[in-house]
Amino acid sequence: MADLNVTLATVHSIGTTVSTILTSVKILVGGVFGLYLIILLVRWHEYSLTKSMLREIDDRLITIEKKLSIPLKQKRTVTQEFKSFAKHLGRENVAVKKALLKK
């Protein structure tokens, strides 16, 4: 039978090694997770600042357009753009008209 003092010393040394390894793992995982949270918070803060800055720029553009009474551009369809492009080139022929009528 093994001596109890030798067994306890062996168990204690194994326990100390496992405890050291677990502490290192806990610090590494906690550190990585903590860094991830910090980076996440920083990115959220930068996003909110960028969003508010873009909103302010948009408001300023709207006030400038109102002061200068510039009409807002209307959205045009692809066919309207194609028609204006064909007119601009002076090549509005039968094939172009047929292609536009198909749509």
Image (cartoon, rainbow, N blue to C red):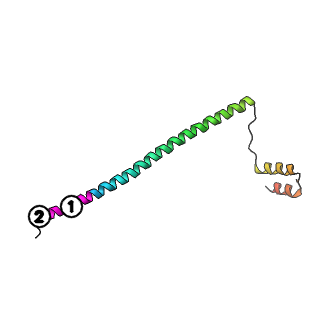
The part of the chain drawn in magenta is 1-19
Q: Residue 11: say if magenta.
A: yes
Gap between marks 1 and 2 measured at Cα: 14 Å
Q: Which x, y percent locates residue 67? A: 72, 29
Q: Residue furthest top?
A: 67
Q: Residue 15: say if magenta.
A: yes
Q: Which x, y percent locates residue 36? A: 44, 49
Q: Which mark is on residue 4?
A: 2
Residue positioned 85% across, 56% down in the render:
96
- Amino acid residing under circle 2: Leu
Image quadrant containing the N terminus: bottom left
Q: Residues within 10 Å of mark 2 (few under 14, many from 20)?
A: few
Q: Nearer the viewer, mark 1 or mark 2?
A: 1
Q: Residue furthest bottom?
A: 1
How many numbered markers are drawn?
2
From this view, report whether residue 3 is shown above or below residue 41.
Answer: below
1 or 2: tag closer to the N-terminus: 2
Residue positioned 34% across, 52% down in the render:
27
| Front in this rendered view, residue 17 or 85 | 17
Q: Which x, y percent locates residue 6? A: 13, 65
Residue positioned 33% across, 53% down in the render:
26
From this view, report whether residue 56 is shown above or below residue 3.
Answer: above
Secondary structure state at the residue bearing disc 2: helix
Q: Main structural element of the magenta stretch: helix, strand or loop? A: helix
Residue positioned 83% across, 48% down in the render:
84
Q: In screen coordinates, is 40 left or right of 50?
A: left
Question: Which residue is identified by label 1?
Answer: 13
Image quadrant containing the C terminus: bottom right
Q: Residues within 10 Å of mark 1 (few under 14, many from 20)?
A: few
- Amino acid residing under circle 1: Ser
Q: In screen coordinates, is 92 left or right of 72?
A: right
